[in-house]
Image: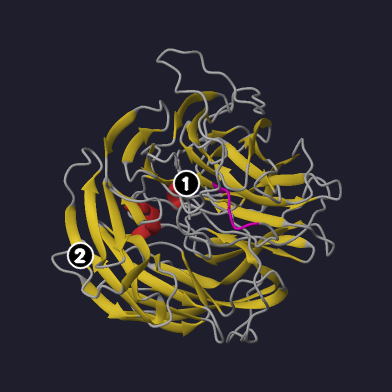
Amino acid sequence: MPGQHDDGYAPGGPATPPPGATPVPPPGVTPAYPTSTPPYPVSTPPYVTSTPPYPVSTPPYPASTPPYPTPTLPYPMSGPPGGGGPYQGPAGPQLTGGFPATAVMPRAKPPGWLVITLVAAIVVAVAGVGTLAWSRFWGGGGVNDRDVAFIPFQQIGSLPGPGSNYGRVFTTVTGDRAYVAHTREDDKLEIRAVQASTARELWRAETSIAAPNWEQVASVSVGVAALSDGYSSSTPEQLVVFNTDGREIWTYPVRSEDQIFFLGDAVVVVDRFANQLVGLRAADGVQTWRHDNPATSSGRKTTAVYPVNSYERFTGPGDFSAVPFAPRSDDHRVVQVGADRSVRIIDAATGAVAASRPNVADPTDKVAVLDGTLYVAAEDSRSGYRAVAHDLATLGEPKVLHTAVDPAARVEELIACGPERVCLLETVRYDVKTATVLVLGGEKPVHWAVPGAKQLSAAGEHVFVNHTGSPYTTKVYALDGRTVLDAQGSAVRLNGRSMLLFANSPSASLGDESVAGVNLADGVQTPLGLLRGVRLSSCSWNTELIVCAGDKSFVFHRFAAAD
């Protein structure tokens, strides 16, 4: 987690430019031409896991034949398969599309990780494509709060992929726009934009730079971004940004410890090498402001930074760690927790500090930010922990939500899990066998045991836990502790009321994956059929369709009736 790495980086950097100062590009930025209005963000975090612990079961009926012909591409293509994965909280070497977006591919390097977090949600018109139908998948008439109308898999189409000698492969879906990407033999990354509902290629592009490995690809506020792998905290990685027409518009050097937040027209970089926050314009990468991290009396400048989330984040499609592919938020603020226990609210576009308060939290404390409220669960070795809520508008005196009864109680995780609700995963002395969920924010805390749980995720007003091990299982609970689903397999969120349940844990190995749809009102499973010959960890989805990388192609399947 951010704030846990105090690596003795050289402090400081130039002070924040005075009002009216002319922005200048930071070293290494390659600004280009302006871009069109952005679409909204998505996370595509890749990761690889071991082979599933048990074979895929066969559904009661096979996937049906596609209802229409597979579209023909204007020219042949090649490239490779793999990627899609997890992320919780603002830390990790990953490119994500939400907040603490999406996921990480394990690699042989120190545990400090890069995060790229994407949070703008903007309806856009794309040249030659027309207006993207975001509203079909996001809001507009409560689409995120209704049961998905599941149907057996129908193959929409496919795009030729890289073949068996692949390096890395990525997919991501935002509304009706999908991006698929793969590394090439020349170490460049090839990216294709696709109309998801027809599997029709819209454009393809390649990065101007080559890298021995590519880490992630994600939809961002101005188009799509790719992140190369620097292999160590001292080796710069490259962030490469394309606009919605497929033109590379800027690059930026980052290190494995850094975080990057795309917030509408602004980008915030948590530069852990220089111990500072840097503000960039999303359209061209030009630097517009900079702040040094708050420091302790001894000069320590570790920090944790969080975007301001909205409840809507938890009512749309999320990846294998429930990180939203396309979070909606028009709040462009970030919350910075300093090493001196101070907290400040910063406007991402201007760098202005809207509010600040001393002695609120440590960078290692558990923090969640939701709909104008800052939640903090601060641990104390003598008394356990205390969970409080601060109004972001004023950062005034906190409201105490809960104080640990057992001084040995510890907080494993704190997540937003409903309107004005947070869910806390508590253990006694970090023993997962004692794990308990507490729902805070109501008239009184609600709690129930979840032995073995290591991570919580939210789906609207539900909490779910994917239990690793053999067999891999998923349990979903309502906020009153009632069990809604207890099944073998790995579940992912479609919206606040519906999920997909895969028979296996996500893996980069090729296999036939059995899938069911689940509506949380009754927990009933609807068999959808088989995804044949896919790498499950590469898959991405919206509320109607799924795209996965196979051995030689990217395949699109529909699993719900179109609105």
Span shown in magenta: 110-115
As shown in the figure, which amino acid type bears the numbered disc 2?
Answer: His
Q: Label 2: few (<14), some or many (≥20) within 10 Å?
A: some
Which of these two is toward me, 229 or 405? 405
Does dot 1 land on a helix, a strand or a loop? helix
Asked whether residue 112 is drawn in magenta, I would say yes
User: Which mark is on residue 402?
Assistant: 2
Residue at label 1?
134
Main secondary structure found in the magenta portion? loop
Percent x, y of residue 260: 53, 42
Does dot 2 land on a helix, a strand or a loop? strand
Q: Is residue 461 visible?
A: no
Is 74 situated left or right of 125 in this image?
A: right
Which of these two is toward me, 453 or 378? 378
Percent x, y of residue 344: 33, 38
Percent x, y of residue 301: 45, 41
